[in-house]
Structure formats: C-alpha cells, structure tokens
Image (cartoon, grey):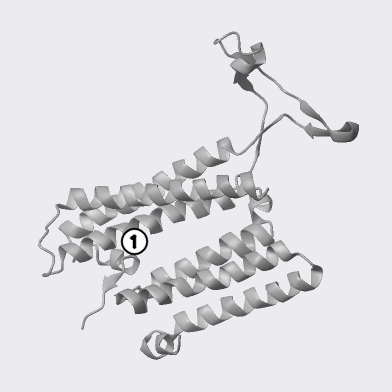
Amino acid sequence: MVSYYKEKRNKKVAIFYTILRLLVIICLIREFIMGNYHNVFLCILTLILFVIPFFIEDKFKVNIPNVLEIIILLFIFSAEILGEIQNFYNIFPNWDTILHTLNGFLAAAIGFSLIDILNRTDKVHINMSPIFVALVSFCFSMTVGIVWEFFEYTADTYLSTDMQKDTIVTKLSSVNLEGGKNFTPKVIKDISKTTIYYENNKVITIPDGYLDIGVIDTIEDLLVNLVGAIVFSVLGYFYILHRDKYKGIEHFIPQKKRT
C-alpha cells in the first residue's frame, strides 16, 4: 500500500480513499457497539474490496485511471455502506437501478481493456476488429451481471438475506392457481393485500398487493446492466476507430503499465 501512495501522481485519489476508509471504520465501530454483527461483516467486506484495485495494479502491472479508481471506490461504498447499512435501497427507489447501470458500464470498460491491451501488445499475435472487441466487452459485462445475480440468489437462499429486493405487485398469473391440472395460467388482478399464515397461527398481512420474491428485481437489474454495457461498448467501438477524437474514454479504461 505504501508503494501505491508513492507512485500515484494524483494525490486526490489517495485522499479520497483515505476518507472513505475512515468513514467505513467509523461505521464498523458503530455497528459493533450496537451489536449489528451482520453490518460489521459488510464493513469488513467493504474494506477488503477497497484494496482490490490497488492489488490489481501491483500484481498485474496495470494502471487504473484516477477517474475509474474513484468511481470504483465510490461504487463499493454506495453499494455496501449506503445501500445495505444505511438502507438507501429502500429510501431511494432508484438507488439499486443507478448502481446496476453503473456496474454494467464499468464491467464493460474492464472487459474492453482486457482485449484492448492484448490487441496492443506485440507479444500476443492477435488483432481483433473493433466490433469484436466491443462485443467481448458487452458479453463480459453481462456475464459479471449474471454472476452477481447468482450470488444474490445464493445468499438469499442459504443465508436468509434479502439481496434480491422484493416487489409489491397488484397482478399475477400462474398455472399453479388451478392446482397444476391446467396449463392455462389463471390471472388475478387488482390485488389489494396478501395474508400469510405461518407457524403457531401467526399472521402477516402485506398491504397494497402481492409480494414478488426477487424475480422482478433480478430482471430489472439485468436490464439496466444491459443498458450500461451497451453504452460503453458503443463508445469503446468508436474509441478504437478514432482514439484522438474519443480520448475521454481513456479515463475509464485500465492500461498496461509501461516498463
């Protein structure tokens, strides 16, 4: 980590990282005192994720642009500390959408850089066309998005978390409502509330509709990830064709360090 501070020309990144790390540590202490050990784990996870960009730079001799580095750190902080611990996902309805769109954009940038570095390396005898590089960038981003949704599903299923946020709906259609004997789905409209009966005659009433468990959230996350991936892939395509004209894209593309 010391080498990181010495090598960085722009000290603003180091200052920004230090501020975020201090905020996470303060949050960790607060959650520990309050006995919220799940949130303590999230804080520790955040601190670990903060180190990954620096590890990649040192291990793989890659230079991550300052703008991209700040966005990655802010993304991690916004997702784990603000989103999960401070409940921004529920306070701000579009918080999750914004983060998944940004994730699609950033993942496409990383996928793009992997191929672009190979294309510009003399030791690797390949020369992919701009459209192919853009396609690989897009596919890499969507793969990352899908793997993340697998992670959310696994955590919700086996750790009883709620990473796949539920959605209140007022309409549903299912063949199971007919006992599984009819393959024509039965449609129920204008659902006003749902009552759940469980152990020891306990009752929970869900107002305003029916609780969709994670499916809508997952699909919406993948759709906005798709938007972010498409935006960067298109920009990356034109960047390869006209590097001088689209120089601003370089702020989001990791580059191989010059030796």
- Classify 10 Å Cα crowding around label 1: few (below 14), some (14-19), many (20 and above): many
* Residue 146 in sight: yes
Name the quarter where the C terminus is drawn: bottom left
Hey, which residue is sitting farthest right in the picture? 201
Q: How many marks?
A: 1
Left or right: 5 with respect to 220? left
Residue 45 percent coordinates (x, y)? 58, 67
Relative to 38, does residue 222 appear above or below in the rendering?
above
Badge 1 amino acid = Ile
Task: Point out residue 13 in the picture as x, y percentages from the top left corner.
Answer: 45, 80
Q: Quadrant of residue 46?
A: bottom right
Give 54 or 172, whichever is nearer the viewer: 54
Give the structural element (helix, strand or loop) at label 1.
helix
Residue 245 is at least partly visible in this image? no
Q: In terms of depth relative to the viewer, which is nearer, 9 or 137?
A: 137
Identify the residue shown where x is 46% and y is 67%. 71
On the image, the x and y values in percent for residue 165 come to 63, 44
Quadrant containing the N terminus is bottom left
Residue at image location 40% in from the left, 45% down from the top: 227
In the picture provided, is 142 more to the left or to the right than 209? left
Q: Which residue is label 1 attached to? A: 110
Up-down: is 171 above or below 61? above
In the image, residue 230 lies at what x, y percent? 34, 47
Q: Residue at x 39, y 55 (%)?
A: 105
* 229 sits to left or right of 129: right
Q: Residue at x 79, y 67 (%)?
A: 35
Asked if 34 appears above or below 209 in the picture, the reply is below
